Image: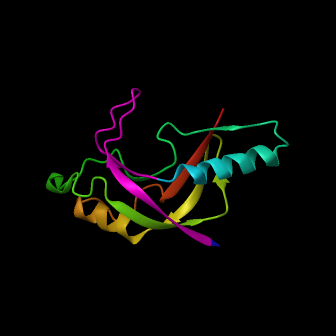
Amino acid sequence: MQFKSKGKIRYSPDTRKNDNKWWVILDCQVDIGKYYRNLYELSTFKTQKLRVPSWKEHITIVRNEKPLNEDAWRLYNNKKVEFDYSTIPRWNDQYYWLDVRCDFFYQLRVELGLMKEPEIPFHLTFGTKL
């Protein structure tokens, strides 16, 4: 099953941990993360919780990739974009996410001179292990 949502594009998201110059993310609605973190907590009979990711609920579009076409950098800053997301959570040892589909993300990457497909497929990160 797929749901639709909207988010806002942000270039070079700021954190105090790393240099995030060549990153592009889509800030997503925080209620999505709250919902899925709560489901996780309930599924563990309230014995475990997930932490909010450092960039909150987000989709990474460009992951530390210097664009060949720097003139297109920040072209879509603050643009609202609609995307589809899966309702089935996925995870690894550290992160929890939902698979995402959005044709505009591919367009943005190509305009920057990057490969259309990112190394890690698009996904909405909603939690990390404590």
Q: Which quadrant does the N terminus fall into?
A: bottom right
> Which residue in the rendered view is the most extreme toward the left?
71
Report how many numbered discs are placed on residues in the image.
0
Is 7 included in the stretch rendered in magenta? yes
Say left or right for 111 vs 43.
left
User: What percent of the width, then of the height, locates residue 72?
Assistant: 18, 57
User: What percent of the width, then of the height, locates residue 128?
Assistant: 61, 40
Q: Is residue 91 visible?
A: no
The answer to which image quadrant residue 48 occupies is top right
Q: Which quadrant does the C terminus fall into?
A: top right
User: What percent of the width, then of the height, locates residue 4?
Assistant: 53, 69
The boundaries of the magenta stretch are: 2-27
State whether residue 5 is above or below residue 67.
below
State whether residue 44 is above or below residue 122.
above
Q: Nearer the viewer, residue 96 or 93?
A: 96
Is 22 included in the stretch rendered in magenta? yes
User: What percent of the width, then of the height, locates residue 30?
Assistant: 54, 49
Q: Is residue 48 visible?
A: yes
Q: Who's the residue at 27% across and 65% down the image?
A: 110
The answer to which image quadrant residue 129 occupies is top right
State whether residue 2 is above or below residue 56.
below
Say left or right for 84 vs 128.
left
Q: Who's the residue at 43% across and 57% down the image?
A: 7
Say left or right for 81 vs 129.
left
